[in-house]
Image (spheres, rainbow, N blue to C red):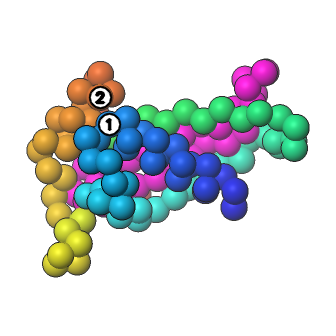
Amino acid sequence: AVYVTYIEVARQEYWRAFSTEPDYRRVPFILAHVSIDFRSEALVREVLVLAIRCGGIGTKSFTFEYEIRERESGRLVVEASSVQVCYDYTVKQSIPVPDELRRGLEVFEGRGLPQPPRI
């Protein structure tokens, strides 16, 4: 369960670097899905490094992809992904990904972002 917390921290740090909105509680999305694949054991004294990138943007959602590695050896510990759905908190429903968010993520990532595959 601690790995879900780690990727939440990574997502918060990504958003802090990406957005001019200082309050993470005002993000325009909700977390809809998390998937974690454990690749190797992490030991108590090991230092872990998290990496995050936007994997794709759909009509109403976008994905983040994560890797957690042991710092010294680079050994892969966890691969994970999450789906964020754009959301209007006032009317409590999903909304299309705003164009400025789509463009902003592509500029921030420095690449075009594909449509995620349908599951």
Eyeballing the image, is 38 above or below 46? Answer: below
Tell me what residue is drawn at x 19 percent, y 52 percent: 97
Instruction: Residue at the far bottom: name it.
Output: 91
Tell me what residue is drawn at x 41 percent, y 62 percent: 31
Is 12 or 82 nearer to us in this picture? 12
Q: Earlier in the sequence, mark 2 or mark 1?
A: 1
Eyeballing the image, is 21 above or below 68? Answer: below
Instruction: Judge whether residue 74 is colored magenta.
Output: yes
Q: Position of residue 96 (x, y in %)?
A: 16, 58
Q: Position of residue 25 (x, y in %)?
A: 36, 61
Q: Main secondary structure of the magenta part?
A: strand
In the displayed structure, does residue 35 sit left or right of residue 31?
right
- Which residue is identified by label 2? 108
Q: Position of residue 64 (x, y in %)?
A: 43, 44
| Highlighted range, magenta | 57-86
Eyeballing the image, is 83 above or below 46? Answer: below
- Which residue is identified by label 1? 18
CA neighbours of label 2 inside 10 A, class few (<14), some (14 to 19), many (20+): few
Can see residue 116? no
Q: Determine whether label 2 and label 1 are within 8 Å by CB.
A: yes
**Kind of residue at badge 2:** Phe
